[in-house]
Image (cartoon, helix red, strand yellow):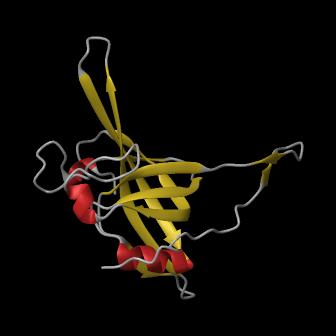
Amino acid sequence: MHVPAHLFYFRTHPTYTNQKGDPMYQQLTLVGNLGSDPVMRYTSSGVPVASFSLAVNKVWTNQEGQRQEKTIWFRVTAWRKLAETVSQYLTKGRQVLVVGEIEEPQTYTDRDGNTRVSLNVNANTVRFIGSRAENEAGGGSGSGGGSAPSGDDPGVSDEDIPF
């Protein structure tokens, strides 16, 4: 499948101000792998909305020289034309770069009674990195990415994903 090279979508970033009226700005950049296929839906007024989970891996070596790894999950929401494009071209396992704004974290209780936090991001830009085949083979480009969990991975279950 050929994906057009111009799949960069920009939306005007809102400007926030503090109590004194000084301008403030929030932007979050993530590189990770889709943990699920995007889910497309429409608002009551017909606006397209797509959402997907994104796994961002952090790998480091601890003081004892042992390799450590941690995965942080984000729930990404794309709107309008960007939502349609994301829904059409992205699938589970695909590596992407997302630029957006983080929403207020929401706490919830998982199935085991543990308190968890959901990190939600409204995407302004989604850039496709590599192909799904490259990501599955471990040859995806970019930094900060990693392999998306698959159903065959005993270390990650669907219960570990907070959405």
| Quadrant of res 45 | bottom right
Residue at the image position 23 percent from the left and 19 percent from the top: 66
On screen, residue 118 versus residue 70, left or right, reads right
Q: Position of residue 13 (x, y in %)?
A: 70, 61
Camera-side residue of 140 and 38: 140
Q: Which residue in the rendered view is the most extreme toward the top?
A: 64
Image quarter in which the N terminus is found = bottom left
Residue at the image position 42 percent from the left and 68 percent from the top: 51
On screen, residue 124 versus residue 49, left or right, reads right
Please determine whether, in this image, residue 43 is positioned above or below residue 147: below
Labels in figure, total? 0
Image quarter in which the C terminus is found = bottom left
On screen, residue 38 versus residue 82, left or right, reads left
Q: Position of residue 125 (x, y in %)?
A: 55, 64
Camera-side residue of 33 and 72: 33
Q: Which residue in the rendered view is the most extreme toward the right?
A: 20
Residue at the image position 73 percent from the left and 60 percent from the top: 14
On screen, residue 23 versus residue 71, left or right, reads right
Q: Position of residue 2 (x, y in %)?
A: 35, 79
Please determine whether, in this image, residue 158 is positioned above or below residue 124: above
Q: Position of residue 18 (x, y in %)?
A: 81, 45
Camera-side residue of 46 and 24: 24
